Amino acid sequence: MHDLTGKVALVTGAASGIGQAIAAAYAAAGARVVVADIARDKAVAAAAAMAPGAIGIGMDVTDEAQVDDGFARVSREMGPVDILVSNAGVQIIAPLAELSFADWKRMLAVHLDGAFLTTRAAMRQMVEAGRGGSILLMGSAHSHVASPLKAPYVTAKHGLLGLARTIAKEGAAHGIRANVICPGFVRTPLVEKQIPEQAKARGIDEAAVIRDVMLRDTVDGEFTTLEDIAATAVFLAGFGSNALTGQSLLVSHGWHMQ
Ligand code: NAD
């Protein structure tokens, strides 16, 4: 189940944080890995450091042509994609009444348009190749719970549940499975940036943001780790039947239980 030898795995947002950890874990499990990121140079460098044969490509997941061109290149150079992790993401902290329409649209574009465009490109290759596949969407505990100051993020992460369930229904006949990974807080650049932002917006200090906001509802006051999420992504990618599809898996130290 944890052997991905010969599989072609494309991970978006993989030049940093969770995506990079997943791509590295896939390479260690034998997959041929594509590190896709809007930050092209960082993607190329991350791939070079990861494993022989890994490639880094520039891809803005909100840009239809960049997504389709990137997948076409992967198909030419490595063969059709077997595993997609739609992981690229950003965070904007703002109260609803102060959120600009541009920021709202940007957030939905990265998280939802990006998931759609990469899923569509991956499914086309998976269906044509006829050997099934695994699509993982990077949700969040915020796919199931809401927090103040994160309206577009919470909205988009909830939306990914609907997309995954639809992929599961349409993909089943082709052996394509889809699941959502829902991490709790992981200390990546995305989270480090929002600690001072949340402190300012809430009028509390940074230690209180960590203790009373981010980790308050966990069972043990612990951050989730990159290793926790990478292990989950390897497990889900390697699970070989439709028994596990259309699901969301919370990996959050019990922040939310379903
Ligand atoms: P990160 O900032 O470390 O990495 C995000 C990566 O996405 C960056 O390399 C960035 O360049 C890339 N990216 C941003 N916009 C892009 C675009 N339009 N096209 C392609 N790439 C783009 O963040 P992270 O914490 O590793 O987050 C990864 C995913 O995990 C996100 O979807 C995030 O919402 C989700 N998530 C993170 C946490 C957490 O606590 N860190 C918790 C739950 C879910």
Image: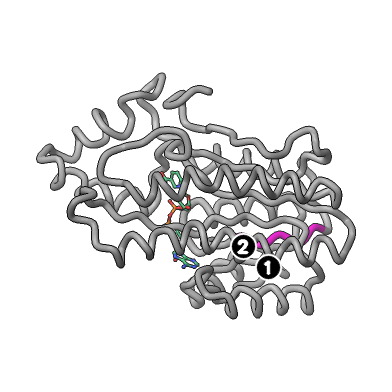
Q: Residue at x 10, y 40 (%)?
A: 203
Q: Residue at x 36, y 53 (%)?
A: 190
Scheme of image coloration:
one colour
The location of residue 137, given as percent across then percent down, is: 59, 49
- Which image quarter holds the N terminus? top right
Question: Depth check: 36 or 179 in front?
Answer: 179
> Is residue 9 within the magenta segment?
yes
Q: Residue at x 48, y 57 (%)?
A: 111
The three-letter code of the residue at mark 1 reads Ala
Residue 104 position (above or below residue 43)? above
**Which secondary structure class fits the magenta region best?**
strand
Q: Alpha carbon of mark 2 to alpha carbon of mark 1: how far?
A: 7 Å
Q: Are marks 2 and 1 in contact (CB under 8 Å)?
A: yes
Residue 221 position (above or below residue 179)? above
The location of residue 142, given as percent across then percent down, is: 42, 39
The location of residue 144, given as percent across then percent down, is: 46, 34
The stretch of residues the image draws in magenta is 7-11
Residue at the limit of the structure toward the left, as seen here: 203
Task: In the rendered structure, find residue 62 and report the number of the disc placed on it.
Answer: none
The three-letter code of the residue at mark 2 reads Met
Task: In the rendered structure, find residue 54 and report the number of the disc placed on it.
Answer: 1
The location of residue 120, given as percent across then percent down, is: 68, 64
Side of 136 where 241 appears, left or right: right
How dense is the environment of label 2, judged by Cα within 10 Å: few (below 14), some, or many (20 and up)?
A: many
Mark 1 element type: loop
Instruction: Kindly identify which residue carries mark 2.
Output: 50
Ligand 1 visible in quadrant: bottom left
